């Protein structure tokens, strides 16, 4: 008995030690830059409640400054972000191992897969070395998806409550992650339908569903309220998506001379930078020119200068941006929808694979194969087995990617770093599904051979 306990302890130490060592090497020491500051970083460092910036990340940076001081707090932020990534991905794969009965080498394989989203900017730098919200949201997303997986597979409502709580935490770090409320809602719908189909506690299921609607609606109103258009960066998105589609003739959409002059100034600034749709390439790699998030940098200073020169206009800065972008966007809504749908294709590729220019057509086929394998393999398992948690897990990942791509591209902008959250988890699920399919084939073959042997004995 004592020997078994020692062996068990030794195995646990080996398991956690290997995971920890692998994680520390990757998250701390890969990449050429220890600290990466982007054009968005000052907004988090010098937080003043600006549009689109949620409070938790600036609060995290201020806490680091209080603890470590002005000189070292950004380095401290990198250390905490990297360690958080180590811990969250470790927790995720350890619990996957327990649920699916994996061996140590399989656990290490899945752990490496979980590192994929953090590697999109390598060899320059790792995600956890950026002073950006992704330094927290990428690691914490693994905890969210762990709750999501447990909720879908176990159908216990305490996991659903944990899922809502984690959604709120992540939304308070990054506004785009309001999409998690949609994936959480979809998970509740799935669980409730499954429970109703199984005729288990139907009244409780319906009551829980109604409760989720009320709670989710209340949280949404409390967090966003009347400032919904400001907090989730919709003001900037209206400007980006609107003026990407703008034509000079759109000047006539505005009734007042002030708004017409502002439109003309903004239009010229955007057109000089070639940020409009007419300058986009028309090949498969068109997505790079469809993601034109630089428009506000060209447009907003023009609006600010006009308002400074004409204080008598009485125009509000943010309201002017929203009116300009929103009016033009509505005028060209059909073209916006086309470009949005066009942008979803590379979004689905980036969610599971890399966008490599010289072989981009091949990237389309690889991504298509991956999705067909994921969906087809899962459906096959569910049709031929009474229960297949591996298939449910795979479909949960694909369902989340579907919600994410649609939401990000319609409501925000399809930047690569917005859509790779589930890349590592996709490959974890793909491996588990592959293992399930192989086991099914082996068992089917064994059953067939046994059946033949029995038939031969009966004939003898």
Image (cartoon, rainbow, N blue to C red):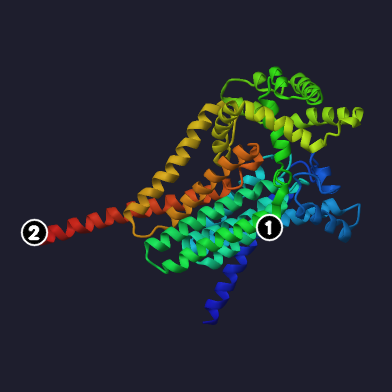
> How many numbered tags mark residues here?
2
Q: Nearer the viewer, mark 2 or mark 1?
A: 1
Q: Quadrant of residue 457?
A: bottom left
Residue designated by label 1: 169
Kindly identify which numbered label has been placed on residue 459: 2
Image side of residue 290 versus residue 303, left or right = left
Kindly identify which numbered label has been placed on residue 197: none
Is residue 19 in view from this perspective? no
| Residue 59 x/y as whole percent | 81, 56
Image side of residue 441 versus residue 133, left or right = left
Using a 10 Å C-alpha cutoff, classify the residue at mark 2 as few (fewer than 14 neighbours), some (14 to 19) or many (20 or more). few
Q: Is residue 53 above or below residue 245?
A: below
| Residue 389 x/y as whole percent | 43, 58
Image side of residue 101 versus residue 320, left or right = left
Residue occupying the far left of the picture: 460
| Residue 210 x/y as whole percent | 52, 61
Of the 4 image quadrants, the one containing the C terminus is bottom left
Q: Quadrant of residue 292?
A: top right
Task: Tell me the residue at 78%/46% (across/down).
Answer: 131
Task: Tell me the residue at 63%/45% (across/down).
Answer: 117
């Amino acid at each position: 008995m004592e020997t078994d306990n020692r062996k068990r302890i030794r195995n646990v130490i080996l398991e956690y030690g290997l995971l920890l060592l692998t994680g520390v090497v990757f998250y701390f020491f890969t990449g050429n830059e220890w600290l990466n500051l982007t054009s968005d970083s000052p907004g988090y460092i010098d937080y003043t409640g600006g549009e689109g910036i949620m409070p938790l990340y600036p609060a995290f940076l201020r806490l680091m400054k209080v603890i470590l001081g002005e000189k070292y707090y950004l380095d401290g932020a990198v250390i905490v972000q990297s360690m958080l990534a180590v811990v969250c991905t470790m927790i995720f794969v350890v619990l996957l191992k327990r649920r699916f009965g994996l061996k140590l080498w399989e656990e290490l394989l899945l752990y490496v897969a979980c590192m994929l989203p953090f590697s999109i900017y390598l060899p320059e730098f790792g995600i956890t070395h950026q002073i950006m919200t992704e330094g927290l949201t990428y690691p914490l997303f693994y905890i969210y998806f762990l709750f999501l997986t447990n909720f879908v597979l176990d159908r216990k409502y305490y996991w659903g409550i944990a899922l809502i709580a984690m959604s709120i935490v992540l939304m308070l770090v990054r506004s785009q992650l309001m999409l998690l409320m949609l994936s959480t809602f979809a998970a509740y719908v799935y669980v409730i339908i499954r429970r109703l189909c199984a005729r288990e506690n139907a009244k409780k299921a319906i009551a829980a569903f109604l409760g989720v609607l009320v709670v989710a609606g209340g949280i949404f109103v409390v967090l966003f309220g009347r400032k919904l258009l400001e907090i989730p960066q919709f003001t900037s998105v209206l400007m980006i998506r609107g003026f990407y589609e703008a034509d000079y003739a759109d000047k006539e959409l505005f009734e007042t001379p002030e708004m017409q002059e502002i439109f003309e100034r903004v239009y010229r600034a955007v057109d000089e930078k070639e940020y409009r749709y007419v300058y986009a390439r028309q090949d498969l790699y068109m997505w790079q020119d469809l993601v034109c998030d630089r428009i506000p940098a060209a447009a907003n200073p023009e609006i600010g200068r006009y308002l400074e020169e004409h204080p008598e206009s009485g125009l509000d800065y943010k309201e002017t941006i929203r009116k300009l972008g929103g009016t033009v966007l509505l005028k060209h809504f059909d073209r916006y929808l086309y470009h949005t749908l066009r942008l979803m294709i590379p979004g689905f590729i980036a969610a599971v694979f890399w966008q490599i220019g010289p072989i981009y057509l091949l990237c389309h086929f690889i991504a298509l194969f991956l999705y067909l394998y994921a969906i087809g393999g899962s459906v096959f398992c569910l049709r031929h087995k009474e229960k297949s948690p591996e298939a449910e897990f795979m479909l949960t990942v694909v369902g989340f990617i579907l919600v994410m791509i649609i939401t990000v591209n319609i409501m925000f902008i399809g930047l690569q770093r917005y859509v790779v959250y589930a890349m590592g988890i996709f490959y974890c699920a793909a491996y588990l599904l592959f293992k399930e399919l192989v086991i099914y084939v082996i068992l089917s073959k064994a059953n067939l051979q046994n059946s033949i042997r029995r038939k031969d004995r009966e004939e003898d």
